[in-house]
Amino acid sequence: MRKTFYEVGEVEQPLRLGFIGCGAFASSTLLPCIPRIPEIGLLATCDLAESRAEYCAKKFGAKAWYTDYEKMIEEQQPDAVAIVGPPPMHLELGVACFNLGVHVFSEKPNAPTVEGSRQLLETAKKSGKFGQVGFMWRHAEAHKIAKNIIESKDFGEPVLFRGAYLTPGPTVPLPETHGDTLEWTYLLDQAVHIIDCMRFLMGKEVYTLYALIEHRKNASKLDSALSFSVSLRFENGATGTLSMSSFYPGFEKYLFVQGDKSQAVDIYNKEDLRHLKRGAWFLPPPPAGTRGYEGLPPGLPTQEWNPGPFHWISPGYLEELQHFARCLLKNEQPRPSLEDAYQVMRVCKAIVDSHTEGRTISPK
C-alpha cells in the first residue's frame, strides 16, 4: 500500500481510473498527484500523441497506454475516467464516456457554452453516472476550513462577500477552444475558479448581478487587457463584490466572507486564512493618542492558519482527485458537481449579458 501524507486508513479496492489527455498541464499537475492517492489505481493513459500517453503511463504507474479512449474503456473497463484538455474536448468526450457507462472527472470548464454544460448534466443523469469538474479552489484546505467556520452557528448567516482574482492573462481570445471574445475566454479560463469558490463559501446562489467590464487594447504592450467589477446579491439577501483583471504581474487571490454575528473570515492565495471573531466596537476604547478604531486593534480575537512548507503542489489539485475517488468508492456524488458547473456557467453568461445590456441580470 502506498503511503502519503494525505492517506487516511487502508484502501482494499482503489478506484480504477483511465486518464484521457496527457498534455503539459495534465503531466505536470494532475498526473503527479495520482501515485500519492491510495484511493486511485491508474489503469491506463490515453492521448492522440502515443509518445505522450506512453511517457505518462510509465512515469505515473499505468501498465497500458492508448490513442483511442473508446478502446481503452472497452479493454480496461475502468470505473471512471479523467478528461483533461480544452473545453470542446471536455464536452464531446464527457458525453461519450457517460454513454459508455463510466464516471467522469473533467477539467474546468466542462464545456465551452452554457448549453454544453447543461447537455453534460442531462447526459450524466440519464446514464446514472457521477461527474465532477476541476474547480479545485474549493478543495484547498484553507477554503475547506473557511467553509466550516462559515457554517458554524457562532458565525451567523453570511451577509457580505468580497472577492478578487488578478491574473497575467489570457490577453487574446481563444476562438477554437474558449469562444470568440476575450471576455468569454477569460471567464472560462480563469473566472470560473473564483465564481465556484464564492458559491461554495456563501452556500447560496447569485440572485442578481450588475457587471462592468473595461477592455483596453494594446495595454502595456499586451494585445488586450480586461478588468471586471461585479456587484452581487445572493438568494439570502447578502451582498458582495467581485473584482478580476487579466493584466496583473502574477496570480493573486482574495476571498472574504462576513457573518451577521460580528465574525469574518478571509483567505489570501488559497493558503493564508484569518478568522476574526469579534468586531473592534466590542473591545475597550482604544488608548488616548492611538489611531482609534482604524485597522485591527490589539487584542482582537483572531485565529490564523496556513499549510506551512509541506504542500508540494498548488493547494486543491491532489485533494480534488482524492475527493473524486473517495466519493465514488462510497457511491456518492462528488463536488463540484455538473450542476455546480452549470450554475457557474450561468453566472459567467450573466456577467457578459449585464455589461452588454447595461442592466441588472439574474442568472436564474
Image: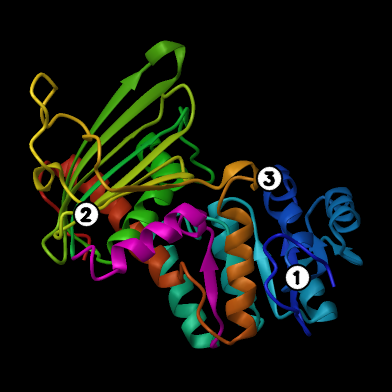
- Counting from the top left corner in percent of width and height, residue 125 is at 47, 84
Q: Residue furthest top?
A: 221
**Residue drawn at (14%, 42%) of the image:** 280
Per the rendering, the mark at residue 38 is 1
Front of the two marks 2 and 3: 2
Quarter of the picture holding the C terminus: bottom left
Q: Are marks 2 and 1 in contact (CB under 8 Å)?
A: no
Quarter of the rendering containing residue 3:
bottom right
Q: Residues within 10 Å of mark 3 (few under 14, many from 20)?
A: few
Q: Is residue 325 above or below residue 357?
A: below
Q: Is residue 84 above or below residue 314?
A: below
**Residue drawn at (29%, 55%) of the image:** 347
Measured in 3D between alpha carbons, the distance from the residue under mark 1 to the one under mark 3, in whole angstroms, is 17 Å
- Counting from the top left corner in percent of width and height, residue 58 is at 91, 56
- Counting from the top left corner in percent of width and height, residue 132 is at 53, 69
Residue bearing the label numbered 2? 263
Q: Residues within 10 Å of mark 2 (few under 14, many from 20)?
A: many
Determine whether, in the image, residue 52 is placed left or right of residue 290: right
Q: Is residue 162 visible?
A: yes
Viewer-nearest residue: 318 or 48 = 318
Measured in 3D between alpha carbons, the distance from the residue under mark 2 to the one under mark 1, in whole angstroms, is 38 Å
Q: Which residues are magenta?
A: 128-156
Q: Are marks 2 and 3 in contact (CB under 8 Å)?
A: no
Measured in 3D between alpha carbons, the distance from the residue under mark 2 to the one under mark 3, in whole angstroms, is 32 Å
Q: Amino acid at mark 3?
A: Trp
Quarter of the picture holding the N terminus: bottom right
Residue 73 inside the magenta-drawn segment: no
Q: Residues within 10 Å of mark 1 (few under 14, many from 20)?
A: many
